[in-house]
């Protein structure tokens, strides 16, 4: 047979069958319309028409069973070739339709039957069920009419009608209602009802004894209830008002209709897709939550929250008050899940969802918060990751977390590539494709929403990736880019940083599942870019107060133009605008100079042309598209000489005027700050914890992007102050304006003695002190020393009131401490670091004011003035300042101990205490227990290694007079690929030099290998050695100039058996 | 306990005494000029945002108005002391006198920290300040201006209050106002241009053609940029510029031996005068350590950044070719370094003459306000040239004739002018 004809033939055949089926159905329907005909007649009629719908009508016979009767054509004989479908009544099979072939026929889809024939018989059965139900209803209505007429006069209440109606139509429901009513009556303490209830219990046993008995209670059948219905409702009518009974019955009926949802939610076997279906079904049933009883609606809310979000009790407790079932209608439509998914949506999604509901549902601040929006979001459930791994057979990856960290690091880039080259299962791809249709070509952000965040805090969540997508181009391109981004976010779970972090906290064994949020980026198109007008972070607690008038609970906003990445992260070279919502008038920067210096310089945005996330210079951006920028007038100011003013749109000349982002108009002429304050207050109040929000504004609406407890933020973790500190170990305590944090392992204290400082009369000498501090700042180990001084650091006014320094003179300190000593009768005002406040904030340098003259404070002046000062040794040229400036080498003064500063803003307490170091510098190159920012760890490790090399170097054997470290290792700027620059003061012969070279080479190669394992950067060797001779040292030539240099001096290292 | 605390007023008096000795001033004149003529101390009650009332201490010191209405800034500073204000008022008298503008010296302030005050509270302080001294200040008595932590905005609040009290428009009451509201054009250029006007005159005196000179400039802020602009226009060549790098927290020197291009550098400069290292390198500039600007082989050094830049430590590094130092910054040279410079015979244009372009422009602002007629920028800068040139010539003439170091000569000129006015008025 011609192949081309074959399919057509088949199609024609199929169409013929289809026509047969339709014809058959039509005839079935026709017969089923005869409600007044006796059922038997109808059934017999059907037996004639059903075979006509089948492929081989001639050999086809039908049979119908209904309750106890069976109808079949005369001479009917059962055969094994049968197809059957149940006829339902009240959800139970009350009969069936069967079709037989009288002889074996060719094999088709279901035995000899076609797939279409299965549909046909099911449809017929369904229509029959429907017909039988109509029949029953019709008859019960008749009976009901009779019943109503016969209702005794002592039952005038209209609700009896319902009971009677149910008695004929839905006895099961009536039984359930009766039981609920009986229970309700009992709980209301109605004795008669209690008696009745006891009547249901086995005879001869009274209630109390049965409760204490271990024997199971004998059960009565439900039918008993039915017989007592009348009595139960009679008792009810005597004790309850008519309204109450009616409303009870109504609610119970609604409850009954909604029960399927609870059943689905509580059934652990049901998948996420089942849940979504059940929610949609519930939606279609059209029951409002107010119509059901409170316990059921609460149970549903709790079950929904638990299935989609979290088992965390605190979260559920709050959520159940705000989250309604209807809130899940849209959410459940935007969930992408693998088949058989039991996943959740993760921490980030939960936080945002709950915050959104709180904002929507609370009556507080409703007028100002009403219009706050949340961007459209799709979710991939947390087990999407497992599905991805299974689908691509990547199971090996699970075991990797138990590898050594160096191996993890080495393999990570490979993992990323493997993930990015893997595929998603068809279900996920379909879901993502739907999501993209929904988002259209709006830029997207793919964020991780980890389940572990709940336990570990955001210091952790920050370790996973969030990726921006321009989402431009063909659907195929966009889908590919989205899959690529999700794969990359998935891979980040197996990155060395999060795994190391988890290992350190004993969380490695927990199974990490990560949900994905695909969120549309808030913003508008501006020229070739896409960005919000501004974004930012809002914090309930202000941990960086720049004025004593600002209270901690006044909160903090960090605002930037464009995408919020620059507000979330700390950037040393750029600044967000800071506002305390509780004190919006008090700005960090006051003079035009300050305002300009500390205004945001860069904007993060999405370039729609290059389809990439970019950082663009604010000035260039404004020149290019300032005219189109939404909220230009609210976000910018014009700098005009020594005046700063808000722009009037027509007066701005973008080419000539100096435009800076200040958010002045936003803060002073719009309700924005007040709204943010209300939002912070509301969420803090309802969630019971200080919150950390991310938000963005597209020029029209304010969007909430994230909400999590503030304690998650790394900066906000208060240090528990150890109890019972021995008084002699305490260097100082503070009790005002304390921020949060912990600074361990301080090895040096630079102490500018307030009294000695006051006694310096020469202004030039006071300036010298500032310069001396600046040099110490370059010399001492970064972030391992504290600066303590009188009054206001960086004072630009009367130099007597504080050491004259600029930020670069103090930028390496760990803590900046201002001491307010009483002078006569008054305590001087402190600066709160205002002169370089934003620099301190961005560099995470702690600020602490001390009030030593307040009685409750400890101030161990004896230690500060009595311990030996190493200033003359460090900077001989400043020896004459020894009275005023003291540098204390803490380990040396305390036999190897260090200073630790604990800051606890929650209790407004801080303490500086002498204790054992966390990291032993002489120990093996172990991991430090404190998590370090990635960029910090490189130089610390290098410095530790340099110290280690020195401690192993035998100066006598090799003829080495001195060993120094300089460059990036000393300056704390070393990156993962940096060398360690060593300066070797060598005075020996050729032979020694060769031995020394060999010795260093061993170290160099070894360190290079370790560095590779730590960072993935390869190098020939890590040490960069610079030899200098005695002549160099005396002549200050070559690198010897670095020794004792005024700026950027090389730092001496302690060699084996030698002092510094 | 002995209190040897540093007192800025005593220091200013000591400086005056030295000049008075050179001039041989009589006792009466000395006593008059050692002290301010009038001081106002007052309280400014302010209703704070939270409803409480706080009292702020305000001052106005009028040091000497023999040559014309007092002129000087208003400072908002938390540790303001009356002695600081007195010293600054005295310095204003000398500064106005050295450029020969008909104004005396004054200074004022309020003890407060604007970082702790909202805009509304600051406005109340400004208005309160004016209410206390409204009868004793004004365009013919005492003319305030912006200073530490006060800006054009503060001046406008003060002006508004003053005009409300006096019932009329008196834009000449205060300077430092924005252009369009009584401000003067040319203010941005004034200090940098003024500096180069004096450089031009100094070179003329030294017999050097600016076209044959090269200069090394420290700083790349407003003053430096306009100085470079004008100096280059005169034919000079700027070999290097040093400036602060915010990210690295250190300074760098950008050198191009055949002369830097101002516009090119500006295009790669952030708002704070920080030049982009990498872009500069790509454009063929050498990027050197920040402190090497001082050792360049050039004819002219222009320290235009901050104070104490030429010190005992680095003064010896000044190249032997250097013939002129023009101090665009305030106090860039320490006394030790000054002594060395004097000994080496390097010609110096001292700071309070070299950077007097700013105060001169403030004077022009006031003049324009008083006649309610505002000049074009060219006219402002032209008049600035005239003023600076004649101020320079007066000082250098004294230096030449009296064989004085330029710095001393400048003081001598300014103090003698004030003393002369007092005498002619018959005060002493």
Image: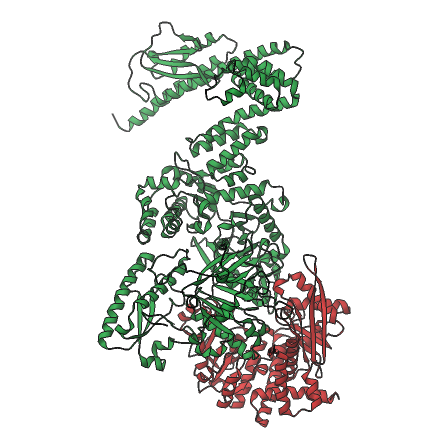
Chain colours: A green, B red
The picture places residue B248, in percent across and down from the top left corner, at 45, 68
- Quarter of the image holding residue B380? bottom right
Q: Position of residue A717 (x, y in %)?
A: 49, 53
- State the residue at coordinates (65%, 10%): A152
Residue B134 seen in the figure: yes
Residue A597, located in which quarter of the rendered image? bottom right
Image quarter where the C terminus of chain A lies is bottom left
Q: Quadrant of the N terminus of chain A?
A: top left
Residue B317 x/y as whole percent: 44, 83
Residue drawn at x 51%, y 22% as measured from the top left: A211
Residue A852: % across, % down: 57, 65
Q: Is residue A210 above or below residue A65?
A: below
Of A543 and B128, which appears nearest the observer?
Answer: A543
Q: Is residue A501 above or below residue A900?
A: above
- Judged left or right of residue A937, residue B1 is right
Residue at the far top: name it: A74
Q: In the rendered image of this protein, does residue A1025 appear above or below residue A34?
A: below
Q: Is residue A249 visible?
A: no
> B10 above or below A169?
below
Name the residue at the right extreme: B167
Q: Is residue A465 toward the left or the right of residue A147 in the image?
A: left
Q: Is residue A368 left or right of residue A276?
A: right
Image mark count: 0
Q: Nearer the viewer, residue B343 or A719?
A: A719
């Amino acid at each position: 047979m011609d192949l081309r004809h074959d399919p057509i033939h088949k199609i024609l055949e199929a169409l013929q069958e289809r026509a047969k089926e339709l014809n058959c159905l039509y005839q079935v329907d026709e017969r089923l319309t005869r409600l007044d005909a006796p059922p038997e007649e109808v059934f017999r009629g059907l037996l004639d028409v059903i075979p006509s719908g089948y492929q081989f009508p001639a050999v086809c016979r039908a049979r119908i069973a209904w309750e106890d009767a069976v109808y079949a054509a005369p001479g009917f004989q059962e055969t094994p070739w049968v197809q059957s479908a149940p006829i339902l009544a009240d959800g139970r099979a009350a009969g069936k339709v069967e079709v037989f072939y009288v002889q074996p026929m060719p094999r088709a889809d279901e035995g000899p039957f076609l797939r279409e024939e299965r549909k046909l018989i099911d449809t017929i059965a369904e229509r029959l069920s429907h017909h039988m139900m109509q029949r029953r209803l019709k008859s019960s209505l008749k009976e009901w009419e009779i019943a109503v007429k016969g209702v005794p006069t002592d039952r005038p209440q209209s609700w009896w009608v319902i009971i009677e109606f149910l008695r004929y139509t839905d006895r099961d429901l009536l039984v359930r209602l009766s039981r609920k009513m009986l229970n309700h009556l009992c709980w209301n303490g109605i004795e008669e009802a209690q008696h009745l209830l006891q009547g249901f219990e086995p005879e001869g046993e009274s209630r109390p004894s049965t409760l204490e008995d271990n024997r199971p209670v004998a059960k009565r059948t439900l039918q008993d209830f039915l017989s007592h219905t009348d009595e139960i409702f009679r008792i009810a009518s005597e004790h309850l008002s008519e309204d109450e009974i009616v409303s009870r019955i109504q609610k119970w009926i609604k409850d009954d209709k909604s029960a399927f949802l609870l059943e689905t939610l509580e059934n652990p076997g049901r998948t996420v897709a089942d849940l979504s279906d059940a929610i949609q079904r519930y939606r279609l049933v059209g029951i409002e939550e107010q119509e059901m009883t409170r316990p059921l609606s609460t149970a549903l809310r709790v079950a929904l929250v638990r299935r989609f979000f979290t088992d965390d009790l605190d979260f559920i407790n709050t959520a159940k008050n705000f989250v309604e079932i209807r809130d899940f209608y849209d959410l459940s439509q935007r969930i992408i899940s693998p088949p058989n998914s039991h996943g959740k949506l993760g921490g980030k999604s939960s936080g945002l969802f709950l915050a959104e509901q709180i904002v929507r549902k609370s009556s507080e601040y409703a007028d100002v918060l009403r219009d706050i929006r949340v961007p459209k979001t799709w979710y991939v459930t947390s087990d999407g990751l497992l599905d991805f791994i299974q689908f691509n057979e990547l199971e090996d990856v699970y075991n990797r977390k138990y590898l050594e960290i160096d191996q993890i690091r080495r393999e990570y880039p490979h993992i990323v590539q493997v993930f990015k080259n893997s595929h998603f299962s068809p279900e996920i791809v379909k879901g993502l494709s739907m999501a993209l249709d929904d988002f259209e070509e709006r830029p997207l952000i793919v964020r991780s929403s980890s389940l572990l965040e709940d336990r570990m805090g955001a210091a952790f969540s920050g370790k996973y990736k969030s990726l921006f997508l321009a989402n431009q181009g063909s659907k195929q391109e966009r889908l590919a880019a989205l899959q690529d981004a999700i794969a990359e976010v998935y891979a980040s779970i197996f990155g060395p940083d999060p795994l190391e972090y988890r290992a350190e906290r004993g969380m490695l064994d927990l199974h990490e599942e990560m949900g994905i949020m695909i969120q549309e980026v808030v913003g508008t198109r501006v020229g070739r870019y896409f960005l919000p007008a501004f974004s930012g972070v809002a914090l309930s607690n202000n941990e960086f107060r720049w004025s004593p008038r600002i209270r901690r609970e006044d909160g903090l906003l960090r605002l930037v133009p464009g995408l919020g990445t620059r507000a979330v992260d700390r950037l040393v070279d750029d600044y967000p605008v800071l506002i305390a919502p509780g004190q919006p008038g008090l700005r960090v920067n006051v003079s035009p100079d300050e305002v300009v210096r500390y205004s945001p310089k860069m904007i993060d945005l999405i370039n729609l042309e290059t389809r990439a996330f970019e950082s663009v210079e604010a000035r260039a951006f404004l020149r290019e598209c300032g005219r189109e920028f939404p909220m230009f007038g609210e976000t910018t100011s014009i700098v005009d000489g020594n005046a700063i003013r808000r722009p009037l749109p027509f007066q701005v000349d973008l080419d000539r005027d100096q435009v800076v982002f200040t958010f002045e108009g936003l803060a002073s002429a719009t309700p924005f700050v007040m709204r943010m304050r209300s939002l912070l207050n509301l969420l803090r109040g309802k969630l019971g914890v200080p919150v950390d929000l991310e938000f963005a504004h597209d020029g029209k609406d304010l969007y909430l992007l994230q909400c999590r407890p503030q304690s998650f933020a790394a900066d906000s973790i208060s240090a528990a102050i150890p109890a019972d500190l021995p008084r002699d170990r305490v260097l100082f305590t503070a009790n005002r304006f304390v921020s949060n944090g912990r600074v361990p392992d301080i090895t040096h204290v630079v102490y500018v003695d307030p009294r000695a400082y006051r006694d310096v009369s020469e202004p030039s000498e006071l300036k010298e002190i500032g310069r001396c501090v600046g040099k110490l700042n370059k010399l001492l180990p970064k972030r391992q020393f504290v600066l303590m001084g009188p009054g206001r650091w960086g004072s630009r006014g009367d130099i007597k009131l504080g050491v004259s320094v600029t930020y670069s003179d103090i930028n390496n300190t760990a803590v900046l401490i201002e001491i307010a000593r009483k002078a006569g009768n008054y305590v001087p005002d402190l600066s709160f670091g205002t002169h370089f406040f934003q620099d301190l904030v961005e560099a995470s340098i702690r600020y602490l004011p001390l009030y030593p003259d307040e009685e409750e404070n400890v101030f161990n002046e004896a230690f500060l003035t009595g311990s030996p000062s190493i200033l003359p040794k460090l900077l001989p040229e400043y020896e004459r300042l020894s009275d005023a400036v003291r540098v204390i080498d803490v380990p040396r003064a305390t036999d190897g101990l260090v200073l630790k500063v604990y800051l606890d803003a929650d209790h407004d307490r801080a303490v500086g205490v002498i204790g054992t170091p966390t990291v032993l510098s002489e120990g093996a190159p172990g991991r430090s227990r404190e998590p370090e920012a990635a960029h910090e760890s490189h130089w610390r490790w290098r410095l530790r290694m340099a110290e280690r090399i020195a401690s192993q170097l035998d100066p006598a054997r090799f003829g080495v007079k001195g060993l120094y470290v300089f460059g990036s290792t000393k300056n704390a700027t070393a990156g993962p690929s940096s060398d360690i620059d060593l300066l070797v003061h060598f005075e020996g012969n050729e032979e020694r030099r060769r031995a020394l070279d060999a010795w260093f080479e061993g170290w160099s190669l070894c360190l290079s290998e370790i560095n590779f394992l730590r960072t993935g950067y390869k190098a020939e060797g890590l040490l960069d050695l610079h030899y200098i001779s005695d002549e160099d040292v005396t002549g200050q030539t070559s690198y010897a100039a670095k020794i004792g240099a005024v700026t950027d001096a090389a730092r001496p290292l302690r060699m084996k058996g030698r002092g510094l | 306990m002995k209190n040897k605390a540093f007192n800025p007023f005593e220091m200013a008096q000591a400086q005056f005494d030295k000049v008075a000795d050179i001039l041989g001033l009589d006792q009466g004149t000395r006593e008059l000029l050692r002290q301010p003529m009038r001081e106002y101390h007052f309280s400014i009650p302010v209703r704070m945002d939270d409803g409480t009332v706080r009292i702020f201490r305000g001052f106005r010191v009028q040091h000497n108005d023999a040559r014309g209405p007092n002129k000087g800034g208003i400072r908002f500073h938390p540790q303001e002391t009356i002695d600081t204000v007195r010293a600054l008022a005295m310095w204003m008298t000398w500064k106005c006198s050295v450029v020969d503008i008909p104004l005396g010296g004054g200074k004022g302030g309020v003890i407060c920290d604007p970082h702790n005050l909202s805009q509304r509270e600051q406005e109340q302080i400004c208005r309160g300040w004016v209410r206390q001294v409204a009868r004793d200040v004004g365009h013919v008595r005492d003319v305030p201006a912006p200073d530490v932590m006060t800006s054009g905005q503060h001046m406008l609040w003060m002006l508004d209050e003053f005009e409300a009290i006096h019932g009329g428009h008196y834009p000449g009451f205060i300077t430092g106002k924005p252009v369009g509201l009584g401000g003067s054009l040319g203010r941005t250029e004034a200090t940098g241009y003024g500096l180069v006007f004096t450089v031009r005159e100094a070179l003329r005196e030294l017999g050097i053609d600016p076209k044959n000179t090269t200069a090394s400039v420290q700083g790349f802020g407003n003053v430096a940029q306009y100085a470079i602009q004008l100096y280059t226009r005169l034919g000079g060549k700027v070999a290097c510029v040093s400036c602060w790098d915010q990210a690295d927290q250190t300074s760098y020197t950008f050198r191009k031996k055949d002369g830097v291009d101002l516009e090119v550098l500006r295009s790669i400069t952030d708002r704070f005068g920080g030049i982009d290292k990498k872009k500069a390198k790509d454009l063929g500039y050498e990027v050197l350590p920040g402190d090497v600007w001082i050792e360049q082989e050039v004819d002219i050094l222009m320290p235009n950044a901050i104070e104490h830049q030429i010190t005992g430590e680095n003064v010896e590094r000044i190249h032997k070719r250097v013939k002129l130092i023009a101090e665009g910054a305030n106090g860039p040279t320490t006394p030790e370094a000054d002594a060395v410079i004097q000994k080496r015979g390097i010609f110096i244009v001292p700071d309070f003459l070299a950077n007097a372009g700013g105060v001169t422009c403030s004077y022009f602002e006031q003049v324009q306000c008083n006649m309610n007629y505002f000049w074009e920028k060219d006219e402002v800068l032209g008049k600035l040239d005239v003023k600076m040139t004649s101020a320079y010539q007066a000082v250098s003439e004294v230096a030449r004739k009296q064989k004085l170091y330029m710095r001393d000569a400048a003081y001598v000129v300014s103090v003698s002018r004030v003393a002369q006015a007092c005498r002619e008025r018959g005060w002493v």
